Image (spheres, grey):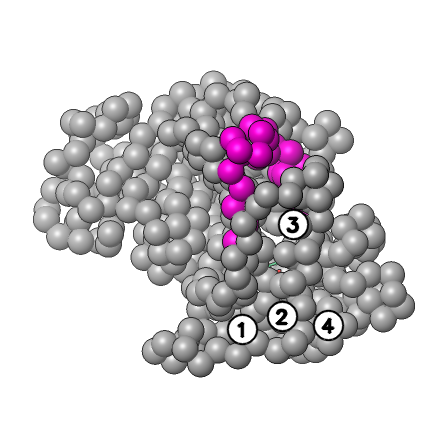
Amino acid sequence: MNIETLSDRNTLTVTNYLKNLIALQLQQGNQFAIWRKPKSGFIQVLIDKTGKTKRVPLHLEELKPGFIVHPFEDQEDQKAFYLEANTYFKIDLNIPFEEQMEKIDQLPNLGNEPIKSDGLQKYFVPESATPWTKTSEECGKSGFIELVNKSLKAIKNGELSKIVPARIKKIRLNESFELVTAIKNLLEAYPNAFVNFFHIPGVGTWLGASPEILIQTKGDSFYTMSLAGTQKATGDNPLKNVAWTQKEIEEQALVSRYIVDCFKKIRLREYEEHGPKTVVAGNLLHLRSDFNVNMNSTNFPQLGSVMLELLHPTSAVCGMPRKEAFQFLRDHESFDRSIFAGFIGPVNVEDETSIYVNLRTARLLEGNAILYAGAGVTEDSDPEQEWEETEMKCEIIGKHLT
Ligand SMILES: C=C(O[C@H]1C=CC=C(C(=O)O)[C@@H]1O)C(=O)O
């Protein structure tokens, strides 16, 4: 599954092919998405050549194969950006690329001429191109600690039980920054993550490695998870000696309760809940519970769309109660979350829909990148520790961009 092993031979490698493919799509102004699902040995590529920015209602079951992108804030018309799969193919990372080229349906022929792939940063979508977001300002350590203190105050006043304030960090992108190298690094470093890159002219250019599924449907099965609580993974076997505090256990339990409340709202009683258990996400550990539903036996064929609407934004990225926490973040956060903590992912691609929360992510701009991270604040939170947590979360993508 190591993308690099395929370049040992002096032949056409996945890395070189993707480098050319990405350069060409950016130059031609196409919308496209590249992703690798957790634990998968395939890179999936979807290109929309229509030249039109499309927005669709979230009736997932009715959509043709595509990739959706939805900002953190609900849109008035409840729609998401949508890339349609004019071209879709996948590359098996376990087979030398040359051997599979002929067999991959729809593989764009990039010709024999090398494609100029330097200076690509000028195609990354600037913040000013997205009139629906305001330019993001960093708040620094003291600003973030102040925000956590305000969150604590609101929790102690009884207005809220959990809030997930976030911050941004701007880093420079060197001129020598290579997008394909960054993607390759993320693929290798985070085998359990949904590694993703997408580019929508007029909307944004984003690169990330999300640990969190929002909803997944395949055949009759529906899946969602509650992910929360964070600590640094240390030692050779970080799962062995992990201990969670009451604060973290409660923080994650709130997310699970939120999911169960959504099931209750739609009178869905037959679901399986497993966990919480500790999971690794890069150099971090989280607590996770898994929820499975059989959509056939419960007679809920549209459960994916219904739950998507009910769940987003979950208390892993917003807070509880949802409406009040959302308003709190709107009033007090000094930057625009844009697509951070929104949701992204393939819809009806190979009969499967996998929508992820857009976490551990960076917005790529010309000359710099914006990293985003939030931290779940509950009654017992320590502001200094929450700051450290956001630093670690920013590092997950940040260290692979320079
Ligand atoms: C909001 C983020 O993470 C969420 C997911 C897992 C653990 C979290 C936490 O421990 O605070 C957050 O709820 C982020 O990565 O920016």
Residue 130 shows in the view: no
Residue nearest the observer in this picture, 29 or 250: 250
The mark closer to the camera, 3 or 1, is: 3
Q: Is residue 311 magenta?
A: yes
Amino acid identity at mark 1: Gln
Label 3 environment density (alpha carbons within 10 Å; few <14, some 14–19, many ≥20): many
Residue segment shown in magenta: 290-313
Q: Does the residue labelled 1 lie within 8 Å of ligand 1?
A: no
Which comes before the other along the chain, label 1 or label 2?
1
Q: Depth-wise, is mark 1 or mark 2 nearer the camera?
A: 2
Residue position marked by numbered label 4 in the rendering: 145
Q: Which of 342 and 40 is in front in this view?
A: 40
Secondary structure under the numbered disc 4 in the rendered image? helix
Q: Which of marks 2 and 4 is nearer the N terminus?
A: 4
Taking the view exactly as shown, the residue that stands out farthest to the top is: 50
Q: Which residue is drawn at 48% across and 78% down?
A: 242
Residue under label 2, please give it.
249
Vertical placement of residue 59 versus 156, above or below: above
Q: Quadrant of the C terminus?
A: bottom left
The residue labelled by disc 1 is: 231
Contact (CB < 8 A) between labels 4 and 3? no
- Asked whether 266 falls inside the magenta stretch, the response is no
